[in-house]
Image (cartoon, rainbow, N blue to C red):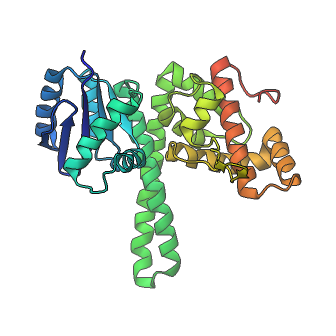
Amino acid sequence: MTTKVIGIDVGKEKLDVAITTEKRVREWSNDEAGRAELIEWVVAQQVSLVVVEASGGYEAAVVSELVEGGQEVALVNPTRVRAFARAEGILAKTDKIDAGVIARFGATMKPKARARRKKEQVELNEQVTRRRQLVLILTAEKNRLQTASAAMQAHITSHITWLQAEIEALEQQISQAIKANPTWAETARRIESVPGIGFVTAAPLVADLPELGHLNRQKIAALVGVAPFNHDSGKQRGKRRIFGGRTSVRSVLYMATLSATRHNPVIKAFYQRLLDKGKLKKVALTACMRKLLVIINTMVKSGQDWNPSIS
């Protein structure tokens, strides 16, 4: 392997590809045929890393196929890449420029390659994602029903019934997939043993956070995006803020934390202590999210069910 790095800027219809050893930027179509040609070219380059910028899901297929093809692939946040471009003094932004920036970002920052996921993990993730999408649509339809005319209410009600059936079918598929995998089943069971947490929380954690139980508390909190970052300068101490991380996991964890502040004795007491100290509710909730995540991570890592002494 050489130290060459490839950067890919992903669009809905095309892939702009740069390599650190050349100025030329190549282009492939973002379809099955185009991705097949791209992967064949990537393999021939013998690079140490392929860096792909996240692009609202349009990158999913190429990342999956590159990983299946044996490539080391890092999926990076566009915000980090844009900050790197500004540091280089590059203010212009085009797909071809971005591809070169992504390649240089990879060579300089050396982002960690994503773990290779088995087909079953990818399918479970897709099912959980689809359920989340349908729930959002269902919520929107229920809101529309309240203000719809009598003529439209029957149509919306019919759609709501269909959505509810689809969500239920997906939940059954997700449940069956988790039960069929002993590791997932055990992880889900441990998560559900936490007071205030059920299947709706456990399934996304299993699907979207396979690192659960394999990282320490600091790394798992940073990965999900519930670790506070300092904003200090000289003697000034700025507010600590959370940033980045896996939005899908954090959203599920937020809802679980709201429930836990009412039904979980450990989180409820911790939340109240923070409020008694004068912490804002949103600050206290963020701290509770982090604590709940750390507890779950510790349980999975140590092979324990819920125990109030775990923290």
> Is residue 98 shown left or right of residue 221?
left
Residue 67's quadrant in the figure?
Answer: top left
> Is residue 88 shown left or right of residue 4?
right
Residue closest to the eye, 63 or 84: 84
Residue closest to the eye, 4 or 30: 4
Residue 249's quadrant in the figure?
Answer: top right
> Residue at horizontal 35%, vertical 44%?
54
Position in image of residue 270 (x %, y %): 82, 43
Establish if 116 lies above or below 139.
above
Position in image of residue 36 (x %, y %): 14, 32
> Is residue 15 shown left or right of residue 308?
left
> Residue at horizontal 42%, vertical 71%?
156
Image quadrant where one finds the C terminus: top right
Image quadrant where one finds the N terminus: top left
Position in image of residue 227 (x %, y %): 63, 41
Residue 74's quadrant in the figure?
Answer: top left
Q: Residue furthest right?
A: 276
> Residue at horizontal 68%, vertical 32%?
294
Position in image of residue 253 (x %, y %): 61, 44
> Residue at horizontal 57%, vertical 28%?
212
